[in-house]
Image (cartoon, rainbow, N blue to C red):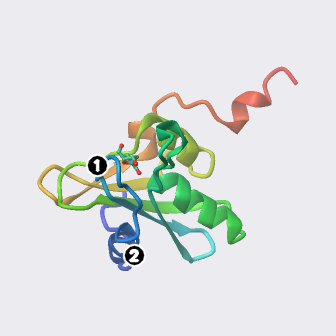
Amino acid sequence: MVDTPNKDLLKVAQAVRENAYAPYSKFHVGAAILAADGQIYAGCNVENAAYPEGQCAEASAISAMVSGGSLEIRQICIVKKGGGLVAPCGGCRQKINEFAGADVPIFVQGADGALQSYTLGELLPAAFGRNNLEVGT
Ligand code: THU
């Protein structure tokens, strides 16, 4: 397990968190991805008056990564404003799984504000992924 995030990952996640558009939940989230191309891609949550249309920070960061031409997550860091626990929702775990292996570290801000490290495999065991679609074809 990787315990140390890329040195810029936390700073980038904290910076993009400032742009979060979260007038409804007031829950401001920033996510930063270190991709296989060595670039860091960032995204924040973007809410909507039609609540289900809102987008999580992780999804925004993944969109930035794919738009930038990269398809492989090496590390991801997720932070919220004001401290306290933030962990990727189930849907975002699945979205991360599309572009990351089970051993990829996910750094999240714990309840005490300190970064905690999990692997994707810990947060999404027995994941359904692209490989499953190849069965029976
Ligand atoms: N949210 C994220 O952006 N990422 C997470 O990992 C958890 C939740 C957002 C969605 C919504 O805009 C707000 O936080 C409250 O759920």
Q: Residue 4 is drawn in which quadrant?
A: bottom left
* Residue 90 location, quadrant: top left
Residue at (41%, 60%) from the top-left corner?
A: 21
Q: Look at the numbered disc 1 and give the secondary structure of its residue.
A: loop
Residue toward you, 30 or 76: 30
- Mark 2 lies on residue: 12
Q: Is residue 2 left or right of residue 54?
A: left
Q: Amino acid at mark 1?
A: Val
In percent of width and height, residue 2 lies at 36, 60
| Residue 23 vs residue 80, the one in the foreground | 23
Helix, strand or loop under label 2? helix
Looking at this view, name the residue that lies furthest to the front: 49
**Residue marked by disc 1:** 86
Q: Quadrant of the N terminus?
A: bottom left
Q: Position of residue 35 (x, y in %)?
A: 57, 68
Disc 2: CA contacts within 10 A as few (<14), some (14-19) or many (>=20)? many
Question: Badge 1 local density, few (<14 within 10 Å), some, or many (20+)?
Answer: some
Q: Which residue is depicted at the point 51% across and 28% down? A: 126
- In the image, residue 47 lies at what x, y percent? 46, 51
The single residue placed furthest to the right in the displayed view is 137
- Callout 2 amino acid: Val
Which quarter of the image is occupied by the C terminus?
top right
Is 76 placed left or right of 109 in the picture? right
Under 8 Å from ligand 1: the CB of mark 1? yes
Which residue extends farthest left?
A: 112
Residue 49 tag number: none
Please name the residue shown 28% across and 53% down the image: 26
Residue 20, given in percent of the width and then of the height, sits at 40, 63
